[in-house]
């Protein structure tokens, strides 16, 4: 199973609202954790499975005006590490991939804003 839901908000850290941080972490981190919460029992019952979550190259390369996004994707990688440890004994693999930018309408909008 893989999941890749993500949102971002562009802006300088001093202009971001608390709600901007909450929305990004709710979707990017909490959404990932809750997805695993619901799939883990199924994988345990079938004696194994594979979970792949999409992080982002933004955890390795800083992008201007995207502090909450990069931070949230770093949390997604750590989530995968912890889940791999917790679920590995059930033959459940958990990994993250960190793709570069993927051409999409969201990326087109971001490119126009930068």
Image: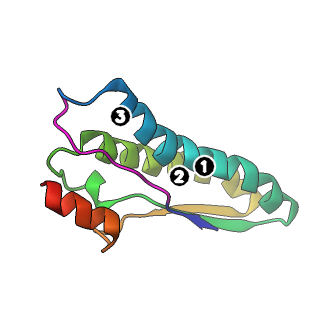
Q: Main secondary structure of the magenta part?
A: loop
Q: Is residue 27 magenta?
A: no
Name the spot of residue 99 as percent of width and height, x first: 35, 69
Secondary structure under the numbered disc 3 in the rendered image: helix
- Residues at badges 2 and 1 in contact (C-beta under 8 Å)? yes
Q: Residue at x 60, y 45 (%)?
A: 33
Name the spot of residue 91 as percent of width and height, x first: 73, 63
Name the residue that disc number 2 marks. 80
| Depth check, front residue: 50 or 12 | 12
Name the spot of residue 77 as percent of width and height, x first: 44, 51
Q: Is residue 10 magenta?
A: yes
Q: Residue at x 50, y 57 (%)?
A: 5
Which quadrant of the figure contains the N terminus?
A: bottom right
State how far apart marks 2 and 3 are (Cα). 23 Å
Which quadrant of the figure contains the C terminus?
A: bottom left
Which portion, as a residue range, is magenta? 5-13
Name the spot of residue 86 as percent of width and height, x first: 66, 47
- In terms of image quadrants, where is residue 19? top left
State how far apart marks 2 and 1 are (Cα). 5 Å
């Amino acid at each position: 199973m893989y999941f890749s839901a993500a949102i971002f908000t562009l802006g300088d850290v001093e202009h971001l609202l608390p709600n901007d941080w909450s929305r990004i972490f709710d979707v990017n981190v909490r959404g990932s954790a809750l997805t695993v919460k619901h799939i883990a029992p199924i994988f345990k019952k079938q004696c194994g499975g594979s979970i792949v979550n999409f992080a982002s190259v933004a955890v390795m390369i800083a992008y201007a005006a995207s502090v909450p996004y990069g931070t949230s994707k770093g949390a997604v990688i750590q989530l995968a590490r912890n889940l791999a440890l917790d679920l590995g004994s059930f033959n459940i693999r958990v990994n993250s991939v960190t793709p570069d930018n993927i051409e999409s309408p969201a990326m087109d909008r971001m490119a126009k804003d930068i």
